[in-house]
Image (cartoon, grey):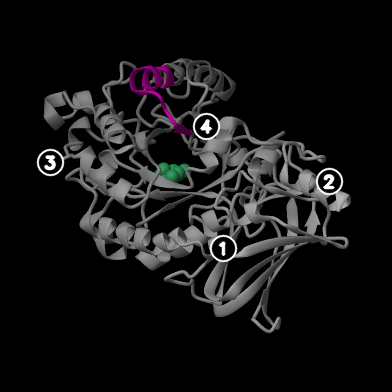
Amino acid sequence: MVRTLIFTLIILRVSMPVFSQPAKPTKQQLAWHEDEYYWFLHFGPNTFTGKEWGDGKEKSEVFNPTGLDTDQWCRIAKAAGSAGMIITAKHHDGFCLWPSAYSSHTVRESKWKNGKGDVLADLKKSCEKYGLKFGVYVSPWDRNHPKYGTPEYNDVFDNTLREIILNYGPVWELWWDGANGEGPNGKKQEYDFARFEKTVRALSPNTIIFSDIGPDIRWIGNEAGIAGETNWNRLDTAGYKRGQGAPPPDTLRCGNAFGKHWMPGEADVSIRPGWFYRSSEDDRVKTAETLFDLYLKSVGRGANLLLNIPPDPRGLIHEKDSAAVMGFAALRASFKNNLASTAHVQLFHDDITLRVPTLADGNPETSVRIPESGVIVNMYWDSPVEINAICLRENLAFGQACAGFEVELWDEHAKVIQTLKGTTIGRKRILTFPEARVSYVRLKIMEQFGATIMGEIEAYKLLHLPPE
Ligand code: FUL
């Protein structure tokens, strides 16, 4: 009895794991993990020229949306479940969507609103109105700026970042693209990323900085929105650079089990074949089902999903795109009904059985420490439930530890219906299977680096399953 009580206290009152992982998230990274899914907006001269990469020689006048309405973008994004918006404030063509003092290729030089328009200001306002986070993509590569390819361009880029943060901040996420080609003088730039990072940290310490290798979040190594089935939130960055010197795609996809830095992956993908809008791709918008499958392959593998929805030349989200994202939201809504809320949860360790209801309370912060591999967590219902998905969660505040697990689904006669196996869990690990009447879900942690701090076990009946 006393032994059981002590053990209960140890397990339920987890405040510090005994084995701590080398890297853990900062409070900003921890908050970012919960953002889960949000929008990318590729918008600029390419929207009007049909190019993917403008060469920087496009006339500023080509940028002329006829009915730009950032409220429409945000209204749809909010209804579609996005947590925020990251806009291409400046893409490789160098065109600035705000009247920058450090460029002569901006909205100010365009015909749009007689040069008085400011897309960043409009979007920021709309984000505030609809409760969305505001982020910016600012391409270091600039095919227009006359100083590009000289040391002074680092001053220009640094000033540009300052200008955006001070005039449009708070900036929730800042996106640094790895692409680095030649500028107008035929030279590539040696970027002073250490300086840029220092500037951002000083002016905006809560901004999450993305690039191939962080410093806060990493690229997932492909533009298809797919995270590794094994996905560690840690990465070794020593010796690597952004762009061509980045770690191999497979490393970015999976992270490093013992990596030095907490560096979770963000999976970016476009709803269309291209990043910018083209009417010729109106019939190639990804379906709601495809978007949901991508959600399972990104968020369902512990990454965040950055979905690109490019506004069209009117300056609106196209009807086809909005229909697809709303369909995706309807499918994602099946995660609102967590059937674990009616289950009982126990933990078996040695010869002790403990009730661990916090694993099914919908809150991953109330967690249970798995002291060693081989421990079984058993979730069961008084009468069978029909489910086709299980979602496991670690409490990332304590790091990431699970390296191998097994989930058995049992029917009411304690017969195994199916065994599911996986490696990492991380923030979320969504496992899908053909719908089954299940009475018991038995999770066994097979391998762990340190103690797994389990946050949650969830069970769902999804409206759509990915193709086999
Ligand atoms: C890439 C860029 O070159 C593409 O144009 C796009 O912006 C994508 C998100 O990142 O590196």
Marks 4 and 1: in contact by CB < 8 Å? no
Cα–Cα gap, marks 4 and 3: 33 Å
The image quarter in which residue 456 lies: bottom right
Q: Is label 2 in a helix, a strand or a loop?
A: helix
- Name which residue lies at 64% across and 55% down: 357
Q: Is label 4 in a helix, a strand or a loop?
A: strand
Between discs 4 and 2, the one toward the N terminus: 2
Q: Which residue is mark 2?
A: 6
Type of amino acid under label 3 = Thr
Q: Position of residue 130 (x, y in %)?
A: 29, 38
Observer-nearest of 409 and 447:
409
Q: Which residue is mark 1?
A: 340
Q: Tell me the mark number nearer the camera, choosing from 1 and 3.
A: 1
Cα–Cα gap, marks 4 and 2: 43 Å
Local packing at callout 2 (Cα closer than 10 Å; few below 14, some 14-19, many 20+) is: few
Q: Which residue is mark 4?
A: 209
Cα–Cα gap, marks 1 and 2: 27 Å
Q: Which residue is mark 3?
A: 66
Type of amino acid under label 1 = Ala
Cα–Cα gap, marks 1 and 4: 35 Å
Q: Position of residue 21 (x, y in %)?
A: 76, 40
Q: Tell me the mark number nearer the camera, choosing from 1 and 4.
A: 1
Marks 2 and 4: in contact by CB < 8 Å? no
Q: Which numbered disc covers residue 229?
A: none
Q: Which residues are magenta?
A: 161-175
Q: Is label 1 in a helix, a strand or a loop?
A: helix
Label 3 within 8 A of ligand 1 by Cβ: no
Image side of residue 136 versus residue 151, left or right: left
Q: Quadrant of ligand 1?
A: top left
